[in-house]
C-alpha cells in the first residue's frame, strides 16, 4: 500500500496530497465511555487527526452461529492512510471486543485544506 500511496503523489512529499492518502475508519464500541477513552488515547498518540463519536447505533449481526443485536457507539476516525497498520495495532490492543470492527475506507474526494490538516496531524 505504501508504494501505491507514493505513486499517487501524496506521501512522498514531492507532489500534493490526494484523497487516497487519507482513510475514514469505522469502529464500534460497547458504550460511550469506552469509546471516549480509547478515542482520546488514539488522538493523543497522533494516530488519527479527528474522531466523531455517534452515541447510539443498533447493530444486528451473526456471531458464532447466532443472530445478535446490540446497542453500540460508532466512532469515525480520519487518519493518514500510511499510518493504518500502527493505528490498527493500537486499536486492537485497547479494544474490548474479540473481533472489533475496523474498516478503512478511502474517500474519493476530500477538501484540499482538510486533507492537508489530516495528514499533518500524523
Image (cartoon, rainbow, N blue to C red):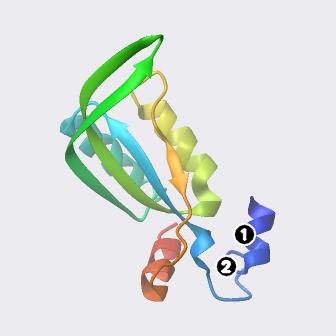
Q: Residue 2: x and y, percent?
A: 75, 62
Q: Position of residue 89 (x, y in %)?
A: 57, 39
Q: Residue at x 68, y 74 (%)?
A: 11
Label 1 sits on a secondary structure element that is helix
Q: State the image coordinates of residue 113 (x, y, percent, origin top left).
A: 44, 87
Separation of disc 2 and disc 1 at Cα? 6 Å
Classed neighbour count for the residue bearing mark 2: other residues with Cα under 10 Å, few (<14), some (14–19), many (≥20)? many
Read off the residue under disc 2.
Answer: 10
Label 2 close to label 1 by CB (< 8 Å)? yes
Q: How many marks?
A: 2
Query: Could you say which is closer to the camera, residue 70 or residue 41?
Result: 70
Please name whichever residue, 40 or 111, is drawn nearer the observer in this view of the structure.
Answer: 111
**Which quarter shows the N terminus?**
bottom right
Identified at 42% across, 81% down, the residue is: 114
Front residue (pair 84, 59): 59
With 92 as the anchor, is 71 left or right in this view? left
Question: Which residue position holds label 1?
Answer: 5
From the viewer's perspective, tell me whether residue 54 is left or right of residue 91. left
Amino acid at each position: 500500500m505504501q508504494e501505491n500511496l507514493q505513486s499517487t503523489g501524496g506521501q512522498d512529499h514531492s507532489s500534493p496530497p490526494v484523497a487516497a492518502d487519507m482513510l475514514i475508519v469505522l469502529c464500534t464500541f460497547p458504550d460511550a465511555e469506552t469509546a471516549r477513552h480509547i478515542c482520546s488515547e488514539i488522538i493523543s498518540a497522533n494516530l488519527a487527526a479527528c474522531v466523531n463519536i455517534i452515541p447510539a447505533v443498533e447493530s444486528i449481526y451473526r456471531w458464532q452461529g447466532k443472530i445478535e443485536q446490540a446497542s453500540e457507539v460508532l466512532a469515525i476516525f480520519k487518519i493518514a492512510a500510511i499510518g493504518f497498520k500502527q493505528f490498527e495495532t493500537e486499536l486492537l490492543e485497547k479494544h474490548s471486543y474479540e473481533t472489533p470492527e475496523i474498516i478503512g475506507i478511502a474517500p474519493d474526494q476530500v477538501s484540499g485544506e482538510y486533507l492537508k490538516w489530516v495528514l499533518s496531524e500524523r
